[in-house]
Image (cartoon, helix red, strand yellow):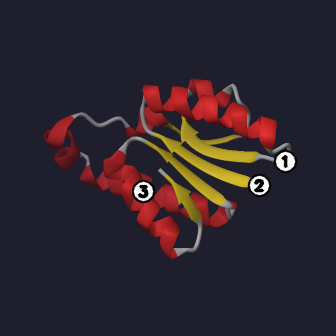
Amino acid sequence: MRYFLIAGEPSGDLHASYLMEKLKEVDKNAVFSFVGGDLMIKQDGHLVMHYKNLAIMGIMDVIKRIHTIKKKFDFCVKQIISDKPDVVILVDYPGFNLRIAKFAKKKGINVFY
């Protein structure tokens, strides 16, 4: 199966890397593309963006960087379209990931949050 994961911060990176490890045990053909961090990188797969590029703190940061956030969202959407995953797995980071979930569901992709 093809998996696309998004973990937007360090604790999500930890949880997602553990999930990737377990998925590889039960799915020998697992292929991962992901937005994540160093722990997910150690599990192999294709890093499309490091979570440090998504780091946002507070409403003022969101307001100042709304254009950048939109570009990162559009980038992830394009990656999902091109990677054609069977499953999208979203870890925490609700402000971003719930919008990704809505998009993926509309495309008929199984989503787990």
Marking on residue 29: 1
Left or right: residue 81 versus residue 102 is right
Identify the residue shown where x is 34% and y is 48%.
Answer: 94
| Badge 2 amino acid | Met
Q: Are marks 1 and 2 in contact (CB under 8 Å)?
A: yes
Above/below status of 59 relative to 57: below
Give the amino acid type for the residue marked by disc 1 in the picture: Asn
> What residue is shown at x 62% (from left), y 29% (from top)?
18
Tell me which numbered mark, 3 or 2, is placed earlier along the sequence.
2
- Name the amino acid, label 3: Phe
Q: Quadrant of residue 25?
A: top right
Q: State the residue lying farthest toward the front.
A: 26
Q: Which callout, 1 or 2, points at the residue further toward the start of the chain?
A: 2
Q: Is residue 55 left or right of residue 28?
A: left
Cα–Cα gap, marks 1 and 3: 28 Å
Image spot of residue 91 (x, y percent): 47, 42
**Residue that carries the numbered disc 2 in the rendered image:** 1
Q: Going by the image, does 31 lie left or right of 92?
A: right
Q: Secondary structure at mark 1?
A: loop
Question: In the image, what residue occupies the spot 59% across and 58% down?
Answer: 79
Outermost residue toward the right in this view? 28
Query: What is the x, y in percent for residue 29?
Result: 84, 48
Q: Quadrant of the N terminus?
A: bottom right
User: What distance separates the C-alpha of mark 1 from that of mark 2?
Assistant: 6 Å
Of helix, strand and loop, which one carries label 3? Answer: helix
